Image (cartoon, rainbow, N blue to C red):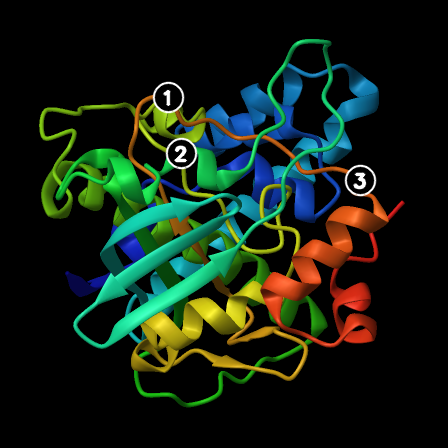
C-alpha cells in the first residue's frame, strides 16, 4: 500500500510540540506554558507575573513569539499544506538487513547494530531485530511489514515565500519545521488507526503522542537509530519523495528544509535506541552491504566511527 495525505496548517497546529519551537529560539521549555494561557492582556500579564522577576523579560518574549507564530500559522493556512507519503511493504530480515518488496521488485536496506550498550546483559540492537527473518515470515503479520514515510510542509503552488526581514524569515522556518513534524505525527496516527490499522481504538492526548505512548516507532533518517544519512537515497528509490515535492541534494539534504523521512515499525516490542560508536570491523561490513565507496561512507558516518 502507498498513500498520500494532506493536512491544513490549522489542523497541524493542534499537535505542535511547542517546547521544541521555543527551544529553537533559545527559550526554555517552561515558557511554552504560554500556549495554554487565555489570549487576553490580563491573562497574559498574570502569566508573566507568575515568574520570578529575573525571568519576566523572557516570559514576555515568549508571549510575543507565540502570538507572532500564531499569526504566521494563520497566514500559511491559506497557501501551505502538510504533505505526507507513506508505503507499507512486506518485509523480512536477513541479519542486519531488511528486505522490502512490492510489485516493482525488492530492496535491501542495511542497518547498523549497537556495539556498546548501557548495561551489561542488554541486547545489542539493530532495527532488523524488529522484523521477522525470512524463514519465519508471515504474510500481513505486524512483524512482517515495514513502513517508509516522508513528510513536508510547503506552499501548495510551489512558489517561494517572501519576507520583510530576518526575524520573519526565521519565524517562518521554525514554524514550518514544527508543522512538518506535526504532519509526521498526524500521518503516523492515521497509519496506526486506519491504514495499517493495528491500533484502531487508539485515543491519545497530544501530550501522550508527544511522549510517544503509542504502539510502534517512527525512527527518522539521521537520528540515533539510522545515523547514515545516505539511507535517504534508498528510501527515496522505494517511495519516490518527489511525489510530494521533496528533492534531495547530493549530500542527502531534503528540500524544502521543513521535511523529514524515516521508517515505521508496528510491533509492540519496538522502542527507540541509539547506535553509538561502531568499530572498523562493523564499518567495513556495513560498507560492503551499503555498496558505497569507503571515503564517501566515512563522511556520512563520521560521528559514529571510533
Residue at 45% x, 24% y is 211
Q: Is residue 37 visible?
A: no
Q: Are marks 3 and 1 in contact (CB under 8 Å)?
A: no
Lower sequence index among marks 3 and 2: 2
Considering the numbered disc 1 on the image, is that residue within a helix, a strand or a loop? loop
Above-or-below relation of 267 to 84 = above
Residue that carries the numbered disc 1 in the rendered image? 269
Percent position (x, y) of residue 258?
Answer: 51, 65
Residue 87 lies left or right of residue 160; in this view the side is left
Residue closer to the observer: 162 or 64: 162
Above-or-below relation of 88 to 122 = below
Give residue 277's mark. Answer: 3
Percent position (x, y) of residue 162?
Answer: 54, 85
Q: Are marks 1 and 2 in contact (CB under 8 Å)?
A: yes
Q: Is residue 137 visible?
A: yes
Quarter location, residue 197: top left
Residue that carries the numbered disc 2 in the rendered image? 130
Quarter location, residue 231: bottom right
Percent position (x, y) of residue 152?
Answer: 40, 66
- Local packing at callout 1 (Cα closer than 10 Å; few below 14, some 14-19, many 20+) is few
Considering the numbered disc 2 on the image, is that residue within a helix, a strand or a loop? helix
Above-or-below relation of 234 to 125 = below
Residue 274 lies left or right of residue 100; in this view the side is right
Amino acid at each position: 500500500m502507498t498513500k498520500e495525505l494532506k493536512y491544513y496548517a490549522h489542523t497541524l497546529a493542534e499537535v505542535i510540540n511547542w517546547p521544541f519551537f521555543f527551544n529553537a529560539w533559545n527559550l526554555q521549555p517552561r515558557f511554552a506554558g504560554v500556549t495554554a494561557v487565555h489570549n487576553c492582556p490580563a491573562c497574559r500579564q498574570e502569566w508573566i507575573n507568575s515568574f520570578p522577576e529575573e525571568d519576566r523579560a523572557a516570559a514576555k518574549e515568549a508571549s510575543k513569539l507565540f502570538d507572532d507564530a500564531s499569526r504566521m500559522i494563520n497566514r500559511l493556512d491559506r497557501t501551505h499544506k502538510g504533505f505526507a507519503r507513506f508505503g507499507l511493504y512486506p518485509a523480512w530480515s536477513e541479519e542486519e538487513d531488511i528486505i522490502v518488496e512490492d510489485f516493482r521488485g525488492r530492496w535491501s536496506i542495511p542497518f547498523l547494530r549497537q556495539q556498546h550498550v548501557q548495561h551489561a546483559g542488554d541486547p545489542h540492537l539493530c532495527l532488523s531485530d524488529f522484523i521477522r527473518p525470512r524463514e519465519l515470515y508471515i504474510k500481513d503479520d505486524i512483524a512482517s511489514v515495514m513502513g517508509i514515510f516522508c513528510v513536508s510542509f510547503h506552499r501548495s503552488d510551489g512558489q517561494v515565500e517572501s519576507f520583510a526581514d530576518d526575524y520573519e524569515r526565521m519565524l517562518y522556518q521554525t514554524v514550518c519545521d514544527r508543522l512538518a513534524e506535526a504532519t509526521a505525527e498526524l500521518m503516523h496516527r492515521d497509519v496506526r488507526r486506519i491504514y495499517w490499522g493495528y491500533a484502531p481504538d487508539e485515543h491519545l492526548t497530544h501530550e501522550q503522542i508527544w511522549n510517544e505512548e503509542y504502539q510502534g516507532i517512527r525512527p527518522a533518517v539521521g537520528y540515533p537509530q539510522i545515523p547514515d544519512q545516505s539511507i535517504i537515497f534508498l528510501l527515496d528509490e522505494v517511495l519516490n519523495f518527489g511525489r510530494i515535492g521533496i528533492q534531495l541534494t547530493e549530500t542527502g539534504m531534503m528540500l524544502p528544509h521543513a521535511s523529514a523521512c524515516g521508517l515505521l515499525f508496528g510491533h509492540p516490542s519496538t522502542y527507540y535506541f541509539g547506535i553509538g560508536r561502531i568499530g572498523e570491523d562493523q564499518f567495513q561490513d556495513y560498507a560492503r552491504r551499503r555498496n558505497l565507496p569507503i571515503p564517501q561512507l566515512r563522511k556520512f558516518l563520521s560521528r559514529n566511527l571510533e
